[in-house]
Image (cartoon, rainbow, N blue to C red):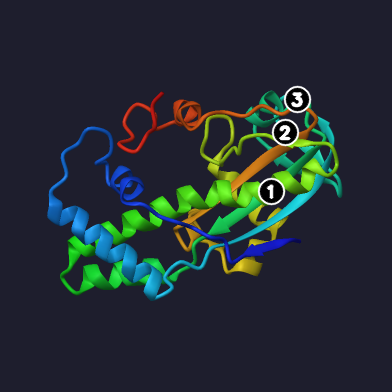
Amino acid sequence: MPVIRDIPLKLKTGAVLRRQGLGGKAKVRPEIKSLIEELLASVKSHHLLQPAAAYEYYLITGMNGVQISLEGDKAVHGPALPALFPEAKELAVIICTIGPELEKQASDYTKNGQALRGMMLDGIGSAAVDMLVPEVLRPIAAEVASRGYEISSPVNPGMPGFAMTEQWNLMDLSQANEIGVSLTQSGILIPQKSVSMVIGIGSHMTRWTPAQVCARCNLRETCPYKIQE
């Protein structure tokens, strides 16, 4: 089971503002931007980001309308997957996280009556997760390229046709406990600033723009963070 650590994340104010629902043409007070810049400096100086990813490759042994069967008598379930990856030869199961420290600091701010700082720091964590995903996919794409393959865009539990109940399955398939990620009884990843996903691997895999990914999401009509073309 490969693990990636020491992943560089260069956060910018604009990405944090989008995660606060203040992207696009929204007017932002100078003091808010100043606070975000201060918090970004604190995140760096106090090493609040500890990004890591655990992943595993599986040969695909078969598909039907509801699942992709994998080597070792395993499977990933959901009608979206065979529909999105019909030509895939392998499946990679990935879980990545920014670690627990930023969440702890955000919670401490809120408990100590500094709710705005806590909220803004939480937004920085969400922006960091957004940036983490492509940084994790980059070395995986390089690995599979050596076999003459490409990777698809990632698909996450909770997207249409890929139920949240698959979180437990992905945890087992990726052995995410190696990077300190666990699940609550309701299927929430801990640390919460973590993400699970699968990608198809093959000769000609489909990629989507960030806006197309948002368009597939169940929250596409109401999400304040969605990206549009």
Query: Could you tell which of marks 3 and 1 lies nearer the N-terminus?
Result: 3
Few, some or many residues within 10 Å of mark 2 (<14, 14–19, 20+):
some
Element type where label 1 sits in the image: strand
Which residue does the numbered mark 3 point to in the structure image?
A: 86
Q: Is mark 3 on a helix, strand or loop?
A: loop
Say above or below: 103 vs 92: below
| Residue at the disc numbered 1 | 93
Where 228 falls versus 16 (above or below)? above
Local crowd size for mark 3, using a 10 Å CA cut-off: few (<14), some (14–19), many (≥20): some
Q: In which quarter of the image is residue 55?
A: bottom right
Please name the residue shown 66% across and 27% down the image.
206
Is the C terminus in the top left, top right, bottom left or bottom right quadrant? Answer: top left
Which callout, 3 or 2, points at the residue further toward the start of the chain?
A: 2
Horizontal side of residue 221 vs 51, given as left or right:
left
Which is more foreground, mark 1 or mark 2?
A: 1
In-front residue for pair 64/221: 221
Label 3 or label 2, whichever lies nearer to me, is 3
Rendering coords of residue 217 (x, y %): 46, 31
Q: Which residue in the structure is indicated by mark 2?
A: 67
The secondary structure type at the circle numbered 2 is strand
> What amino acid type should be assigned to the residue bearing mark 1?
Val
Which residue is at a point 51% across and 68% down the rendered structure image?
Answer: 50
